[in-house]
């Protein structure tokens, strides 16, 4: 039986916004690689949005554009926190000797 602390939190949510998890011993498997790639895209998007925010805050930006930026930054922050949580759990499981999630 797979224990909950052995699951990998995936970088996307399920249909109802609930977290999705992966149970595997194969960190090089298809789903693990897919999750790694999506995490990379999400972190790249967050970086690009941060750069955009810095530029927009220095300029005279329209309120509608700032609202759109805030919406996009909120989504990027949610994704980044999910990536950080997932990676933190995997680091924790390695240090305690549990199987990787």
Image (cartoon, helix red, strand yellow):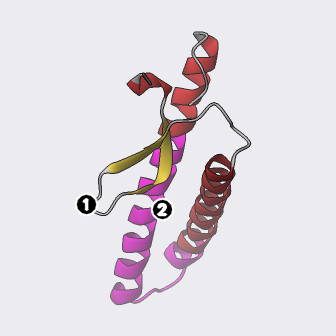
Between 15 and 38, the one nearer to me in the picture:
15
View extreme (top): residue: 96
Left or right: 70, with 89 as reference point: left
Between 26 and 97, the one nearer to me in the picture:
26
Magenta segment, prevailing SS (helix, strand or loop): helix
Which quadrant would the N terminus be assigned to in this image? Answer: top left
Between 58 and 38, the one nearer to me in the picture:
38
Mark 1 or mark 2, earlier in chain? 1
Residue in the image at 61% along x and 51% along y: 31
Residue in the image at 29% along x and 58% along y: 17
Q: What element carries label 2?
A: helix
View extreme (right): residue: 28
Q: Callout 2: few (<14), some (14-19), or many (20+) C-alpha neighbours within 10 Å? A: many
> On screen, 32 above or below 6?
below
View extreme (left): residue: 16
> On screen, 1 above or below 66?
above
Between 7 and 93, the one nearer to me in the picture:
7
Magenta segment: does it hold 61? yes
Q: Is mark 1 on a helix, strand or loop?
A: loop
Q: Residue under label 1, please give it.
A: 16
- The quarter of the displayed image where residue 58 is located: bottom right
* Residue 77, percent from left and from top: 45, 56
Magenta residues (range): 55-84
Residue in the image at 53% along x and 46% along y: 83
> On screen, 42 above or below 60?
above
* Residue 70, percent from left and from top: 38, 71
Real-space Cα separation, disc 1 to disc 2, in angstroms? 19 Å
Left or right: 80, with 20 as reference point: right
Q: Residue under label 2, please give it.
A: 76
């Amino acid at each position: 039986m797979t224990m909950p602390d052995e699951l990998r939190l995936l970088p996307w949510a399920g249909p109802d916004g609930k977290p999705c998890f992966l149970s595997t011993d194969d960190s090089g498997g298809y789903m693990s690689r897919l999750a790694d790639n999506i995490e990379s895209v999400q972190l790249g998007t967050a970086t690009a949005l941060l750069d955009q925010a810095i530029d927009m805050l220095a300029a005279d930006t329209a309120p509608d554009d700032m609202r759109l930026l805030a919406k996009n930054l909120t989504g990027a922050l949610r994704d980044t926190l999910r990536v950080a949580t997932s990676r933190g759990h995997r680091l924790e499981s390695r240090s305690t000797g549990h199987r990787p999630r």
